[in-house]
Image (tube, coloured by chain):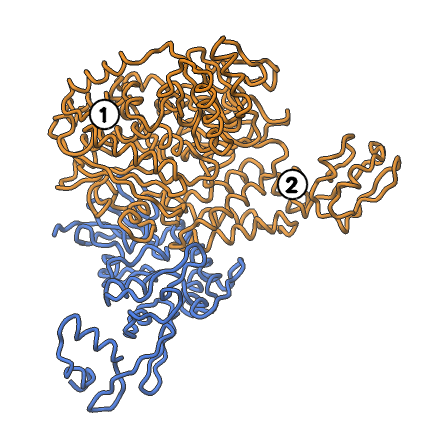
């Protein structure tokens, strides 16, 4: 595209772009997010290209066949959306392509077999926006994702891209900060610190050099909101950073991305180049006299580098270890200069806040937590994926309306929020609004927005053990409570799940939690107690059952359970006998079978295959 | 330099803005136990967590490490509250379970009433049985000596100081500053006749021309001559006979 040197030129260019688009032209949008690519969306795209060519159809290949970022409904990929009919097809295979072209593109017919089926009502829903997974979402951060080609700057411009920047550059930098403050935007990386306040403090520090940084080191297991934004809408992050840099007076910015996100790195790099060519980065941006550029720095895969001070050290080329933040990074951050570090999703919200105004944004959410938040909804729930909802939605609404309820009709037990150092919230609190303060109040946290749904078959001691194990591995090892405390917590938890728990274990765990939350150096350490504290708080009876009765109520901890065959229920079909990997089930046809407990490895295959529900866990 | 007045344990004391709380306490004869901090090493401190104190400022209280908490106007410090004692005791119990053989840690833990840790104890190889991974040795080597022969390797509970790939380091000058600085005497340095062994490397010691005592590794003399241009003849005699 041409280089844009003024606001007028940008406006003219956007107008020309809009005029050149034919909205009625049939468009096939194929998700090229990491999940769908893994499921074979590239092959599906190839099949469409081939089919369209063969049939000589008037589908504009340039725009018509669009490879987009993640739609968030990854478990049902590859996803194919059609325009203008707004049909969404799930799990599309190359062999489905000729039929889609024939029926749906040419004749607007719906192919029932490929559309969404509601698990509960069995209703077939073809329209993208009517699927419950999307219907109850409010997409601000994910506004463009799935609709635009992330590698096309023109696509971004067509969705009002860089208009926020264009507006911001005509504003006074203080006015921008005031606008962000008024919007109530709080840090989406987990801390929830008011973004505007951070910017103002940074600007207030006297210095010739300032930096802005973007934290794209998303490391929570199961979380992929930042990855999706960087992959699917990279320009929105850059635009936010340019606005932020102009507001605080920075001329250099860094995006710190984890190297395990190759597509995010690639799309960001392409976006940087395009933005430079177009004149949104570099010297004298849009003729405003403001100079700013961004570099990408790839992380080495340490979880702790998502912590702000460790990230900055890593950016400086040092070992990624946290430092005491008694002097804040807005005062002394990167290279000891005043710095603003915000998360991917925080930056991505900035352009629309400037464009649409603070009061528009503050219209969503709750009193203390404005706007929307992207969550990765995973676990034992029917619809998993990336969802964006207004702050303040209750746990119940999220799990039932968007998630479609617990998988397999099982009972809902708890949600775990906030990543590995978040906490577990029990069913009895399912009317709790999801916002920064409410989550902290009940002993969990917003974190970066991971939500894991747990059903009745989940053992909460096992859950605590799982997260502590993760944190043991990811602790940087700098401070005593985290380095030496977490392995000791893990050893107590392991003993409890193996039937070796003893009186006083719960108290010892609580004491260790205190040492961590009061004594650890960084946020990773101080919050590492959450998984243990919250499970003890809400599920202490489960701990007691393990310790005193040597039982695992959920039937998960292998050393505490035995598999038995109910003689009455067993029909003697011999299916379990055949499937047992240990050959430790005895029994003749039409006679009740018996498990030899001394050989049983408690794999549960017998229970899974039994058609008569005759295998019981005791 | 801006002077400020702060309160430690109810007592008003004079300090310089941004000085560390621990330094101010020491200047005023107030004892706070500490391990990983050395006043001459800017990047030291903050890792052992033994010097935790309560910092009250702007109506808020939090536990901070006194070794790197900067003194600012209006600060009040309490070093002996129940919370401080409880958390420090927890930290010392963890350190004792990490290095049960360290005399320094044993004594310090005993002062807080711990004789035996409740948790499993670590066993280690080489220096590990006394090392608390505080990183002071590596900080001294980089910041004071300027050779960076050792650094903190690995992460999590395996974090420990060492040379690259655990091989004798070509950068090490055998000065032994790491061993002198180590708060738990965990670094093995052996001087025998005119050789010194440290970090798996052997050094020849230069003898004093007066008393004949081997007193400095030749590699350290080379380093000093190279970096500050001191006359080599200066090192003929030990400090006692210069």
Q: Position of residue A198 (x, y in %)?
A: 25, 34
Q: Is residue A183 left or right of residue A78?
A: left
The orange-tinted chain is A
Residue A365 pos. (x, y %):
38, 20
Instruction: Report crowding for label 1: few under 14, some 14 to 19, many 20 or more residues within 10 A (C-alpha).
Output: few
Residue A1 tag number = 1
Asked whether A418 or B183 is in front, the reply is A418
Q: Secondary structure at mark 2?
A: loop
Callout in the foreground (2, 1): 1
Total marks in image: 2
State the CA–CA distance, disc 2 to disc 1: 58 Å
Chain B painted colour: blue
Asked if the residue at tag 1 contacts the one at tag 2, i.e. Cβ–Cβ closer than 8 Å, the answer is: no
Residue that mark 2 sits on: A556
Q: Which SS class for mark 1?
A: loop
In screen coordinates, is A331 left or right of A505? left
What residue is at 34 percent from the left and 68 percent from the top? B182
Residue toward you, A369 or B57:
A369
Residue B80 placed where, x, y %? 35, 54
Q: Residue at x 63, y 34 (%)?
A: A457
Name the residue rendered at 37%, 48% in the picture: A300
Q: Chain of mark 2?
A: A
Q: Position of residue A586 (x, y in %)?
A: 83, 44
Above or below residue B112? Residue A433 is above
In the image, taking residue A312 as reference, residue A504 lies left or right, namely right
Taking B146 as reference, is A70 above or below it?
above
Tell me the chain of label 1: A
In which image quadrant can residue B205 be found? Answer: bottom left
């Amino acid at each position: 595209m041409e280089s844009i040197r003024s606001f007028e030129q940008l406006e003219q260019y956007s107008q020309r772009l809009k005029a050149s688009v034919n909205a009625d032209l049939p468009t096939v949008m194929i998700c090229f997010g990491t999940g769908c690519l893994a499921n074979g969306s590239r092959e599906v795209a190839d099949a469409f290209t081939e089919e369209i060519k063969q049939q000589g159809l008037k589908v504009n290949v340039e725009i018509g066949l669009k490879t987009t970022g993640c739609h968030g409904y990854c478990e049902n990929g590859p996803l194919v959306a059609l325009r203008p009919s707004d049909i969404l097809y799930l799990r599309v295979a190359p062999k489905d392509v000729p039929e889609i072209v024939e029926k749906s593109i040419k004749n607007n017919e719906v192919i029932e077999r490929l559309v969404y089926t509601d698990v509960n009502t069995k209703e077939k829903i073809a329209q993208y926006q009517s699927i419950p997974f999307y219907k109850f979402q409010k997409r601000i951060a994910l506004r463009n994702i799935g609709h635009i080609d992330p590698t096309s700057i023109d696509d971004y411009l067509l969705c009002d891209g860089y208009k926020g920047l264009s507006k911001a550059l005509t504003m006074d930098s203080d006015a921008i900060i005031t606008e962000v403050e008024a919007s109530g935007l709080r840090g989406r990386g987990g801390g929830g610190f008011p973004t505007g306040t951070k910017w103002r403090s940074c600007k207030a520090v006297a210095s010739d050099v300032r930096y802005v940084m973007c934290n794209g080191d998303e490391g929570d297991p199961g979380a992929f909101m930042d990855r999706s934004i960087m992959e699917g809408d990279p320009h929105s992050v850059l635009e936010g950073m340019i606005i932020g840099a102009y507001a605080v007076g920075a001329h250099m910015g860094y995006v710190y991305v984890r190297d395990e996100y190759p597509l995010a790195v690639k799309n960001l790099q392409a976006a940087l180049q395009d933005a430079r060519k177009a004149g949104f980065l570099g010297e004298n941006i849009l003729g405003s006299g403001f100079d700013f550029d961004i570099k990408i720095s790839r992380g080495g895969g340490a979880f702790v580098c998502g912590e702000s001070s460790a990230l900055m050290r890593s950016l400086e080329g040092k070992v990624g270890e946290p430092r005491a933040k008694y002097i804040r990074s807005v005062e002394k951050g990167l290279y000891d200069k005043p710095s603003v570090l915000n998360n991917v999703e925080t930056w991505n919200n900035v352009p629309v806040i400037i464009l649409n105004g603070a009061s528009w944004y503050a219209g969503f959410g709750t009193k203390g937590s404005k706007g929307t938040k992207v969550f990765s909804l995973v676990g034992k729930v029917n619809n998993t994926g990336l969802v964006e909802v207004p702050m303040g939605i209750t746990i119940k609404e999220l799990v039932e309306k968007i998630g479609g309820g617990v998988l397999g009709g099982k009972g809902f037990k708890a949600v775990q929020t906030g990543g590995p150092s978040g906490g577990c919230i029990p069913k009895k609190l399912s009317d709790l609004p999801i916002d920064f303060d409410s989550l902290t109040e009940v002993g969990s946290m917003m974190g970066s927005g991971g939500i894991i749904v747990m059903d009745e078959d989940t053992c909460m001691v096992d859950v605590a053990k799982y997260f502590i194990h993760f944190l043991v591995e990811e602790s940087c090892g700098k401070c005593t409570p985290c380095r030496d405390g977490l392995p000791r917590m893990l050893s107590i938890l392991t003993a409890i799940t193996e039937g070796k728990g003893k009186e006083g274990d719960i108290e010892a765990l609580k004491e260790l939690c205190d040492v961590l939350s009061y004594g650890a150096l960084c946020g990773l350490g101080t919050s590492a107690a959450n998984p243990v504290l919250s499970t003890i708080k809400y599920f202490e009876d489960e701990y007691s059952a393990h310790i005193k009765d040597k039982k695992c109520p959920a039937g998960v901890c292998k050393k505490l359970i035995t598999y038995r065959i109910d003689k009455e229920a067993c029909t003697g079909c011999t299916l379990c006998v055949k499937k047992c990997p240990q050959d430790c089930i005895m029994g003749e046809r039409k006679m009740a079978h018996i498990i030899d407990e001394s050989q049983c490895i408690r794999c549960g295959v017998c229970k899974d295959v039994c058609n008569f529900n005759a295998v019981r866990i005791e | 330099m801006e002077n400020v007045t702060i309160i430690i344990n109810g007592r008003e004391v004079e300090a310089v803005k941004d000085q560390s709380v621990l330094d101010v306490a020491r200047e005023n004869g107030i004892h706070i136990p500490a391990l990983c901090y050395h006043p001459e090493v800017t990047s030291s401190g903050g890792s052992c967590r033994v010097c935790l104190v309560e910092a009250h400022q702007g109506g808020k209280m939090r536990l901070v490490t006194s070794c790197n908490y900067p003194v600012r106007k209006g600060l009040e410090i309490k070093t002996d509250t129940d919370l401080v004692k409880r958390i420090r005791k927890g930290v010392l119990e963890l350190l004792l379970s990490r290095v049960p053989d360290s005399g320094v840690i044993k004594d310090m833990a005993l002062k807080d009433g711990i004789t035996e840790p409740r948790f499993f104890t670590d066993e280690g190889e080489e220096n590990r049985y006394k090392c608390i991974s505080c990183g002071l040795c590596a900080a001294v080597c980089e910041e004071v000596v300027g050779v960076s022969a050792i650094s903190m390797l690995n992460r999590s509970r395996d974090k420990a100081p060492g040379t690259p790939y655990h091989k004798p380091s070509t950068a090490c000058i055998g000065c032994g500053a790491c061993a002198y600085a180590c708060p738990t005497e965990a670094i093995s340095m052996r001087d025998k006749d005119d050789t010194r062994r440290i970090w798996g490397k052997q050094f020849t010691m230069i003898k004093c021309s007066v008393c004949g005592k081997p007193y400095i590794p030749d590699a350290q003399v080379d380093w000093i001559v190279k970096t500050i241009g001191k006359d080599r003849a200066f090192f003929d005699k030990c400090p006692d006979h210069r």
